């Protein structure tokens, strides 16, 4: 701790607009992610106020031989920001949350890395603009920097792929305190309008889980906000039928979003509580005030359909269609409807996708926990479209193999299926009752935090759940799946050929020769 004390004294001279936290409660809180595993506790938590302050602080820390671990909104469940080594300083980026420039002429926006997707979305909506990919469902907390570091898909991904593909350039603080700019903004007389000014060095700092530096500022593409958004939902009798339908729709590139849920998830909507009710309230308000939300068109029967609309549905598929013209949007919807009908689907109430778009960044309780306060822990495989049905079957076989143990311990599972352009994701989740911990409790409404705060720890169930998750990870790796949010959980280096491992380690040696930036992430130590 002598080293930490010395670093603290120097940081207090450098950090003039931000702050440094030293108390044990804060250090433990910020060092804990959603992975249900423990790591080291940071010696200090740094909250810089701007890019230069960030860079200067990093130099102080690394010159002293301590490690740097960047943290965004904290939504990682792959140990992305859990310190692996002692003598670590964790950087909480959320104080750097400004929208720096919205350029509606050249169609880009620059934000500080700690800006949330919710804040960015609302700032752009005032100007009828949007980023192509515009956030995960946890965007109330998830930051742009954290998302770009992990990579992500959901809102807008059906048409515009993952978060990383919306990035034009980044400003990164390296281990030696240098601020590095990528993309055309690196041109001495240029601006950040283009990503590929020479080799794509921007790509080096996307999906890297903060392995090569700490992102300070990010420039994203802009598009005009869609004039029209339409919604449609279908039920399917089997996972196979739903997955096949999704792969057909993915190739057509007509859905802004297209995501599916299994019976367990569908049943849970009956018990989601007032977060979902707030979404319905938004729709009621839109119904009264026509045009209350730009581009949101739907039959407002959803405002009175209640929460039981998916209770008896087996597999449910939900689609969103964006366009500049209502007729074009309807053409996409009608094309998708025909595909769904041909694959044995039955059209159902479109409440869910309508609510998700009406309030895209509501609370995260329904994302992070089960309907009765169960812990939620996902795992996923990222695959070509041709493998989706096969991997879906293997996933079901895996759970069937472990069904008796899961039933005995009251451990449940569910599926989210989704595509990003022409890439496919199957994300099973595992649910069990266990201690929630301070971090999860801080993210949910007070009413539910009070109700679930006393759920006791259950180490037996947790051990089984983590083993199941590990088994699914290994199953997906064996079958050639890739992953988003690699963090320190997925065996990235073990899956790569030797030449690529050598190149990756060579890059690390150039930008971080002491190996002090987020040690362990991407398997780089």
Image (spheres, rainbow, N blue to C red):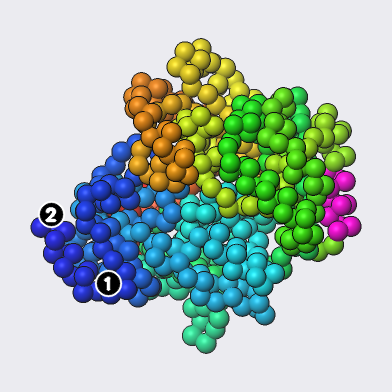
Q: Position of residue 478 (x, y in %)?
A: 52, 31
Residue depicted at 32% across the width and 64% down the height: 47
Label 2–label 1 contact, CB within 8 A: no
Residue depicted at 63% across the width and 64% down the height: 131
Q: Is residue 234 left or right of residue 441?
A: right
The residue tagged 1 is 15
Mark 2, Cα crowd under 10 Å, few <14 / some 14-19 / many 20+, is few
Q: CA distance from mark 2 to mark 1?
A: 20 Å
Q: Which residues are magenta?
A: 326-336
The residue tagged 2 is 1
Q: Position of residue 233 (x, y in %)?
A: 77, 39
Residue depicted at 33% across the width and 59% down the height: 91
Disc 2 on helix, strand or loop?
Answer: loop
Disc 1 on helix, strand or loop?
Answer: loop
Q: Earlier in the sequence, mark 2 or mark 1?
A: 2
Reply above or below: 15 against 300. Answer: below
Of 50 and 367, nearer the camera is 367
Label the magenta part by its dominant secondary structure: helix
Residue 114 visible in the picture? yes
Q: Position of residue 19 (x, y in %)?
A: 28, 66
């Amino acid at each position: 701790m002598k080293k930490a004390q010395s670093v603290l004294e120097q940081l207090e001279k450098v950090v003039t607009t931000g702050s440094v936290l030293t108390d044990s409660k804060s250090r433990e809180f910020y060092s804990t992610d959603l992975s249900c595993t423990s790591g080291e506790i940071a010696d200090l938590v740094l909250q810089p106020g701007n890019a230069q302050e960030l860079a200067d602080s990093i130099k102080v820390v690394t010159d002293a031989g301590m490690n740097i671990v960047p943290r965004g909104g904290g939504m990682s469940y792959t140990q992305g920001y859990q310190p692996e080594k002692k003598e670590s300083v964790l950087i909480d980026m959320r104080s750097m949350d400004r929208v720096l420039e919205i350029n509606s002429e050249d169609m880009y926006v620059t934000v500080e890395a700690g800006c949330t997707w919710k804040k960015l979305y609302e700032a752009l909506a005032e100007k009828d603009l949007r980023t192509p990919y515009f956030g995960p469902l946890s965007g109330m907390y998830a930051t742009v920097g954290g998302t770009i570091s992990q990579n992500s898909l959901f809102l807008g991904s059906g048409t515009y792929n993952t978060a990383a593909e919306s990035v034009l350039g980044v400003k990164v603080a390296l281990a030696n305190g240098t601020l590095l700019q990528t993309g055309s903004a690196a041109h001495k007389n240029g601006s950040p309008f283009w990503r590929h000014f020479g080799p794509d060095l921007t790509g080096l700092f996307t999906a890297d889980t903060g392995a090569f530096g700490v992102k300070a500022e990010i420039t994203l593409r802009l598009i005009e906000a869609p004039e029209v958004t339409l919604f449609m939902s279908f039920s399917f009798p089997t996972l196979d039928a739903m997955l096949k339908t999704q792969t057909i729709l993915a190739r057509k590139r007509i859905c802004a979003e297209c995501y599916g849920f299994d019976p367990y998830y569908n049943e849970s909507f009956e018990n989601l509580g007032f977060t979902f009710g707030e979404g319905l309230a938004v729709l009621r308000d839109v119904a009264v005030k026509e045009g209350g939300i730009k581009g949101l068109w739907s039959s407002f029967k959803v405002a009175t359909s209640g929460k039981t609309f998916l209770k008896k549905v087996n597999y449910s598929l939900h689609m969103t269609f964006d366009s500049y013209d209502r007729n074009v949007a309807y053409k996409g919807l009608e094309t998708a409807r025909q595909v769904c009908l041909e694959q044995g689907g039955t059209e159902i109430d479109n409440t869910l996708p309508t609510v998700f778009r009406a309030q895209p960044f509501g609370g995260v309780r329904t994302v992070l926990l089960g309907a009765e306060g169960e812990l939620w822990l996902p795992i996923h495989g990222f695959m070509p479209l041709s493998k989706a049905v096969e991997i879906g079957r293997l996933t079901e076989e895996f759970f069937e193999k472990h069904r008796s143990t899961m039933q005995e311990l009251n451990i449940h599972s569910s599926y989210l299926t989704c595509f990003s352009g022409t890439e496919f994701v199957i994300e099973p989740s595992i649910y069990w009752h266990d201690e929630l911990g301070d971090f999860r409790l801080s993210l949910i409404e007070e009413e539910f935090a009070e109700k679930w705060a006393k759920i006791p720890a259950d180490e037996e169930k947790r051990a089984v759940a983590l083993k199941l998750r590990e088994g699914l990870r290994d199953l997906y790796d064996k079958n050639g799946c890739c992953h988003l949010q690699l963090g320190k959980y997925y065996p990235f280096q073990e899956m790569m050929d030797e030449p690529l491992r050598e190149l990756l380690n060579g890059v690390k040696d150039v930008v971080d020769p002491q190996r002090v930036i987020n040690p362990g992430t991407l398997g780089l130590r």
